[in-house]
Amino acid sequence: MKTNLSVRYRIPMLMAGFISLMCGMYIGLARLGWQLPISSAAQFALHGPLMVCGFLGTVICLERAVAIGERWAYLAPLASACAALLLITDAAPGAGAALAVIASAILVMVSIRIFLRQRELFTFTLLLAALCWGLGCVLWICGFNPAQVMPWWMGFLVITIVGERLELSRFLRPSLGSKLLFILALVLYFAGAIAASASAVPDFRLLAASLILMTVWLMRNDIVRHTIKQQGLTRYIAAALICGYAWLLAAGIIGISLPQLHAGSSYDAFSHAIFLGFVFSMIFGHAPIIFPAISKLKIPYHPSFYLPLLLLQASLLLRLSGDFLYAANLRKAGGVLHAVTIILFILVLAASVIRNKNKSM
Amino acid sequence: MTLIIHQLNPDEQRIYKALQTVIDPEIGENLIDLGLVYGIQIHDQVATVTFTMTSYACPMSETVIENIHETVSKALNAGIELDLDLVWEPAWEPSMMCDQAKQRLGWS
């Protein structure tokens, strides 16, 4: 523990991640048709990179670096935070993308370190997730289109989350059959990602099938079945996870039922059901324990945490309705509500930090 | 590695009981019931708590250390120092949980 990096050096990286989140949302709103000033047309393409690499990449890299407590591991969040800032400022987008590749490569090394220390299926799964991020970054820098990069960045987040849930499923003593089902879902995901990435048109049917299988696995093996019966923070986390699983299933159903996904409608519905519905529900659930682990700022549970969680679900219903009904105004309203929800969530957490500080004074 | 309260002296038992109030928020169970505490020993005015985590990839270890420190310090007699020893060997196994926790988590 003595080698771990001081919190005062972690905070700027975390802040860069949040700046990336804010800029990513801003560009997302502009893409939805809101008349917002954008410095160049090329910036429209930065929505995904800023959200995945700049925000989520930085937070996940920080999480792992704090976990292993070795200073070299912080080079990963440092690289992704710098990548985000270079992309946002339009100073050197090429260098920004290269730094994202470097961040992912360091995360792979960190994940190898973790796997060698604890040789379990879940640590191997986390390593696969990091490899997905790296491969996605390489495809992005090589100029592949977003629909070809997306399966790998999606894999980075989805596989990281299911890997962490696999670890926690050990409390329920999973059977050999459940482990095999998990492995099958992973194999299917990679087959689906390769197929989607190689396809000339966005075809995510195989990948979507793996998402359904993952949801089945999560519903059968996740500890939420027990923790939802608890109270306070434990129950809140479980509620957020269940919402996330519902969106993962929704994404699977959308992807498997449509032979081809279309940008501006089904493709957006599919990707946002995962990136916002599944991934952000997880973030909302785990932020009260993960952000204190990184920043050492205590975020005690408060029932108000449910408000942004509920709004997130409502904003997604609105957004996906707009996607499928080709209703631009619904999509735009859903987009604004996503942004309002995420900002509200940050404010709710900040209020909890302030309440706790005032209490302890 | 099962820690048995009756084998501890009264001061160590106070630490044991304090650790029963440190909850893993993700599971909703305490560190003792989860089998994460491997040892409690007071020797030469130093109380040593040996514990583990379930995952080397989890960033919670610093938070857990702080929580243990905060809780156990209140249970210590004046003049006794607290030393927390995070170990990875032996690796935690689900079978290390206490029977009540196993039952609550649905083990038959």
Image: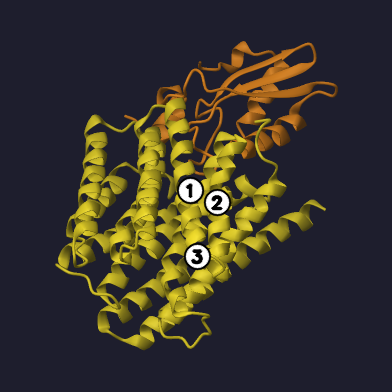
Chain colours: A yellow, B orange
- Placement of A232 over or under A199, stated as above or below: above
- Placement of A29 over or under A85, stated as above or below: below
Q: Looking at the rendering, in which quadrant would you find the N terminus of chain A?
A: top right
Query: Can you give x and y, in whole percent of width and height, for residue A164 in the image?
Result: 41, 42
Q: Secondary structure at mark 3?
A: helix
Which residue is at a point 28% across and 75% down the rendered structure image?
A263
Q: Secondary structure at mark 1?
A: helix
Circle 2 crowding by C-alpha within 10 Å: few under 14, some 14–19, many from 20 = many
The answer to the question of whether label 2 and label 3 lie on touching residues, with beta carbons closer than 8 A, is no
The residue that mark 3 highlights is: A93
Q: Which amino acid lies under the numbered mark 3 shown in the image of this protein?
A: Pro
Res. A33 image quadrant: bottom left
Residue B61 badge: none
Circle 1 crowding by C-alpha within 10 Å: few under 14, some 14–19, many from 20 = many
Mark nearer the viewer, 2 or 3: 3
Mark 2 or 3 closer to N-term?
Answer: 2
Instruction: Tell me how far mark 3 sits from mark 1, CA to CA.
Output: 14 Å
Between A257 and A231, the one lying in front of the other is A257
Q: Which amino acid lies under the numbered mark 1 shown in the image of this protein?
A: Ile
Disc 2 and disc 3 on one polypeptide chain: yes
The residue that mark 1 highlights is: A102
Q: Which amino acid lies under the numbered mark 2 shown in the image of this protein?
A: Ala
- Position of B57 with respect to A173 (left or right) is right
Instruction: Tell me how far mark 2 sits from mark 3, CA to CA.
Output: 14 Å
Dot 2: chain letter: A
The answer to the question of whether label 1 and label 2 lie on touching residues, with beta carbons closer than 8 A, is yes
- Position of A349 with respect to A102 (left or right) is right
Circle 3 crowding by C-alpha within 10 Å: few under 14, some 14–19, many from 20 = some
The residue that mark 2 highlights is: A79
Which residue is at a point 59% across and 50% down the rendered structure image?
A78
Disc 3 and disc 1 on one polypeptide chain: yes
Dot 1: chain letter: A
